[in-house]
Amino acid sequence: MSGTHQDTGDRAVVLVDEDARAWRPATARSRFREGLTGPTAGVAAGHTQVNLISVPADWAYEMLLFCTRNPKPCPVLDVTDAGAWTTVLADGADLRTDLPRYRVWRDGELVEEPTDVRAHWRDDLVTFLIGCSFTFEWALSRAGVPIRHVEQGRNVPMYVTGRPCRPAGRLRGPTVVPMRPVPPRYLSAAIRETALLPAVHGGPVHCGDPSALGIADLSRPDFGDAVEPEPDDIPVFWACGVTPQAVVMASRPPFALTHAPGQMFITDERDERYRVV
Amino acid sequence: MSGTHQDTGDRAVVLVDEDARAWRPATARSRFREGLTGPTAGVAAGHTQVNLISVPADWAYEMLLFCTRNPKPCPVLDVTDAGAWTTVLADGADLRTDLPRYRVWRDGELVEEPTDVRAHWRDDLVTFLIGCSFTFEWALSRAGVPIRHVEQGRNVPMYVTGRPCRPAGRLRGPTVVPMRPVPPRYLSAAIRETALLPAVHGGPVHCGDPSALGIADLSRPDFGDAVEPEPDDIPVFWACGVTPQAVVMASRPPFALTHAPGQMFITDERDERYRVV
C-alpha cells in the first residue's frame, strides 16, 4: 500500500503490504489525507471500515429511512449533524479529506473522483457512515476461510442485482452485492461468522447460482475487480454498502458525495465491537 | 387474558391463559380492537411484539436519528409513511385500534390512555415500531431461563436510569431498562441468547448492582410491576423500548402517541426471524 500500489480507478490493483496491515487507523487516515489512494482491504487490520454517503439535508430523512428499511445493505453506524465533518467513530478525523478517493455525484451522474472533497463541501450535507463487508473479513480469516480477492491482490468484485431495495420517498434502487468464492468445507463457518456481525451486513443474501440474483456473468463485476475462484468454490453474496451509490444513480438526487468503491473510511472502532457474541 | 384479567393502569395484573398464548397474531389484534386490554407478555407466543411511537412528520427525522444513534433501546423494525396506519409487519392491522391501550402525549405530558386512537389520529403522523424485549423471552424460556414476572403474573418492571441516550436534534432523554432476575446458573445463557437478537435490544446493558445505573430501589419501578427475585437471582437489565416515552417526557414534542407500557402491538413476524444465527 504505502505508495507502491497502482491506482487505475475502479480496477485499482491493491498491494497491501505488512506495513499497511499494521497501521493504526489514525496513521492510515493521515496517509490518505496526504494523498495516498487505493483500495483499503486489509489496511489497519482489525479496525472497522465504513462506506460514506453525504446528501443535502432535505434528502437526509429519506436516506435514513431507506437505510432503516434496508438494514442488510445499509447498516448505519453513524450519522453526522448537517455540515459536520467529524464522527464519533474516529477521533480527530476529517470526513472531507481522510478517504483515499471520493466520488462526486450530480443528478445521479458521477462527475468527478477527487481525493479530497473540501472544494465540494456544503453546510447542509448530512453524512452517513455505513457498515462495510471488509469488516467481516477478519472473522472469515480467523475461521480459516480463504479470502480470494485479498490472496489475488484485487478489490472485491461487486454486482448490481435484480433485487430492488424497499423504497423510501424519492429513493429507490437495486441491491448491490460483493461476491467471495468460498470452498464448500468453509461455507458453514462463513455464514455463521458473518451472521454474528449484523451491523456490517450480517450473513449472506445468497449462495450459489448468480443468476438467482440476476447476475449474468461473474467475470464482469459492476464495481471492483473480477476474482478467480478455485474449482470447487461456491460463490457467496453478501449485501453491500455500495448499494447507496446504485440508489444515487437510480434516484438522481441533485448532489451527493460518496467514497470510491473499495476505498473506505477507516474508523477507530475495533471490528470485535460489532460482533454480537 | 381472554377477558379475565384486571386492568388497573400501570399496575395491571395480567393473567395469561393458555388460550391467549396460542392465539394467532391476527386473533390477538382483533380482540384488542374489540376492546380487550392488558399486558401482552406471553400473548400469541413466538410472534414479535413491538413498541409504538407516532410523532408529527416534522419530528420524524429527529426520531429516526435518535433511534439510529441509540440502537440498543430503540431498534427500529418498521417506519410508516406519514399518515399511514398499516405496517409491513402485520397483514391487515390498523395501528390506531389494534393495541390493548395507548398513551396520548401533549407537550411531553401524558393526557389520556385510550384503547383506540382514531379520534387522535393526524395525517402527518409517522409511526415507529421498535423491537421489544418480550420477543426474547421465548429465547430465554427455551434456554431454561425462568421468567420471574411471567411466573408471578405481572408486567415486567422497568426503570428510568441515570444513563443519557445520545441526543438527536431536539430529542434527548434517559435510557429505560426492564429488569429480569436471573439465577446465576442461567446468566451465561441469558446473555448469549439475547445477544443473538440484536433487533430486539440484544444483550444486557448491565448485570448486578442497580445503583450502577442510578436505580435506587428495585421494588419501585417507574413502569410496570415490581417482581420478587429468588434469593440468589442476579438482576439483569436490558435496554427498553419504553425509552422513547422517557424521551417524550424529557423533550416535550407538541404531540405523540405511544403504546401503554407492557401493552404492545403484536406483529405477524416470528421471533425466530430476528435471531442472527
Image (cartoon, coloured by chain):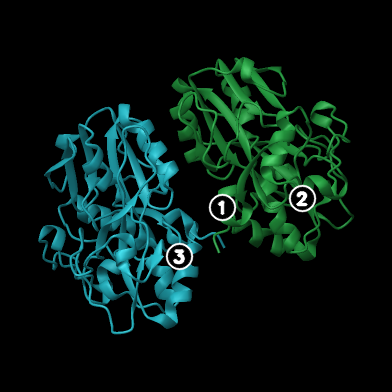
Chain colours: A cyan, B green
Q: Residues within 10 Å of mark 1 (few under 14, many from 20)?
A: many
**Residue named by callout 1:** B198
- In this view of the protein, can residue B238 be seen by the observer? no
Rate crowding at label 3 as few (under 14), some (14 to 19) or many (20 or more) other CA atoms within 10 Å: many
- Residue, x 18% and y 60% (percent of image)? A38
Residue A234's place in the image compared with A67, above or below, is below
Query: Picture coordinates of residue A266 (x, y %)?
Result: 32, 54
Query: Residue shown at 47%/60% (left/top)?
Result: A197
Q: Residue at x 45, y 59 (%)?
A: A202
The label on residue B22 is 2
Q: Do badges 1 and 2 share one subunit?
A: yes
- In the visual, does A147 lie left or right of A7? right
Instruction: Please state the chain letter of the residue tagged with numbered disc 2 in the rendered image.
Output: B
How far across and how far down the image is residue A121, in percent?
20, 34
In the rendered structure, the answer to whether residue B140 lies left or right of residue B121 reads: right
Q: Chain of mark 3?
A: A
Q: Chain of mark 1?
A: B
Q: Which percent across, then down, holds residue B58?
A: 44, 20
Q: How far apart, in angstroms, are the residues tagged by discs 3 and 1?
A: 14 Å
- Mark yes or no: residue B151 visible: yes
Task: Tell me the tag on residue A194.
Answer: 3
The quadrant of the rendering that contains the C terminus of chain B is bottom right
**If you read the primary sequence from the N terminus, does the residue marked by circle 1 or circle 2 appear first?**
2
Quarter of the rendering containing residue B155 = top right
| Mark 1 and mark 2: Cα distance apart in space | 26 Å
Q: Secondary structure at mark 3?
A: helix
Q: Residue at x 58, y 18 (%)?
A: B121
